[in-house]
Amino acid sequence: MGIFPELDFFMGILPKERRLKMYRKVLGCFLLVLISLAGLSVAPNSIFAAESKVIKLGVLLPLSGGTFAEAGLQAKEGFLMALDEINKEGGALGKKIELIIEDDMGKPEVGVAAAEKLINRDKVAVLLGGYSSTITYAIMGAIKRYEPVVAWIGAGAPKVEKFVGKERWYFHYHPVSYHRQAAVRNFLDSLKPRPKTIALAYEDGLYGTDSATVAKGYLEKAGFEIVLFEPYKSKATDFTPLLTKIKKLNPDIYYWVGYAGDCILMIKQSKEIDFNPKLFLAIAVNFPDYKPSLGKTGDWVAGSCPWIPQVGLPAAKEFMKKYRKYNPTANGEPEYWVPLGYINLRTVVDAIRKAGSLEKNKIIAALEKTDYASAMGRIRFTKDEGGGIHQAIQSHIITQWQNGQPVVVWPAELAGGTVKYPTPPWNQR
């Protein structure tokens, strides 16, 4: 009698050859089931043992690929600075923090694949980082079904906020574009003599298009005349046709909405064709390569940003002391992405500590109670005018390069100097 009596009876009525084949198949299947069950009984324990030593957090940044990489590398430095401090403090929940950092290469499809990997393969507790609005929109579209905890420092386009800003699992640090554009409008309104005409150019991705539309509405409502509203291709190698067109319009202000990677060429080629409005105003002018690349040519240019080291906040001075100690060989001043990356990790780990668990809803609840004094001001997640429910930073400053140094010129309570305006001709600087 075999181990399956009913099977033996059935086999008995079959020819011998077929009976042997059937026995082999059945026993083979039985062995596979046993092996699978054995694997299941061991796998969870071995996985738990490996994961119990660290808490994995995923970071997505553009670390290569041209235009975006400058900011991504700066943010990475801030993450690593915070990681060093946190693990020296003992980590969280008795475990070290491990960052799994992925490069989105400035490409939506790469960012989506990296986010899927971090969530499904690496099983990270929280997804941090971020930069481009276009890439963020693609990533959130792909991972929304998982509802992971996301603490995001990039993506200032209102369209991203409309897409995921009301999700309880999504926390956003970087100001949204309308915060920036409100600051730009108020700054321009404060200039004397008050400018009348503005040429507005923007990079043709989601960030530039969305932000420029907001800017145009704010500026026109304030009484400024927009004499040009035109997109350009980020990473272009020649802006001369665009600049020549704007020069002929002779605007009081040339304001362009784009990324740091385009700024240097934009200013150099403006000088080459002797285009000199009363004020150059950009989104990104406070980054490490600005001064080495432009020298005196970069003076008189203004820009809007959330932070520079010279901002009048006591916590900023303390942060810079830590930064210099952590990176004594740093060349130049850090861009705001350094403290933003630092703040991102510190607040997430602080929430994990307070949650006392890696359970998603407990981390979310702890993040919602964040109250962190940072180099960029107090970090709290509050409701935003655009509909987001977890927005951290909502303010912007205006800076201007003067004598080779960035100076905060607006708002008055944080200013380290006054704006130099109007800009003199190139041959008189």
Image (cartoon, helix red, strand yellow):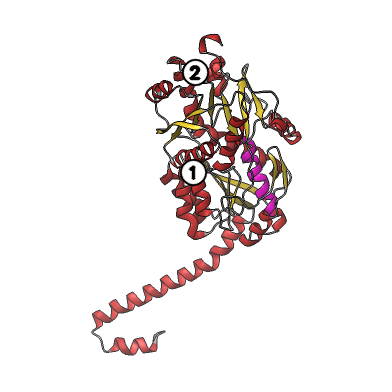
Q: In the depicted view, which residue is nearer to us: 191 or 395? A: 191
Q: The C terminus is located in which quarter?
A: top right
Left or right of 382 on screen, residue 106: left
Instruction: Name the residue that disc number 1 marks.
Output: 133
Q: Secondary structure at mark 2?
A: loop
- Point out which mark residue 276 bears: 2
- Main SS class of the magenta portion in the image: helix
State the separation of the CA atoms marked 1 and 2: 31 Å
Magenta stretch in the rendered image: 335-352
| Residue 163 seen in this snapshot | yes
Q: Is residue 136 above or below residue 147?
A: above
Q: Is residue 146 above or below residue 224?
A: below
Graded by Cα atoms within 10 Å as few (under 14), some (14 to 19) or many (20 or more), the crowding at tag 2 reads many
First in sequence, mark 1 or 2: give its number. 1
**Quick one: which residue is furthest to the top in this view?**
427
Q: Amino acid at mark 2?
A: Asn
Residue 322 position within the rendered picture, expressed as x and y whole percent measured from the top left: 72, 33
Q: Residue at x 30, y 78 (%)?
A: 22
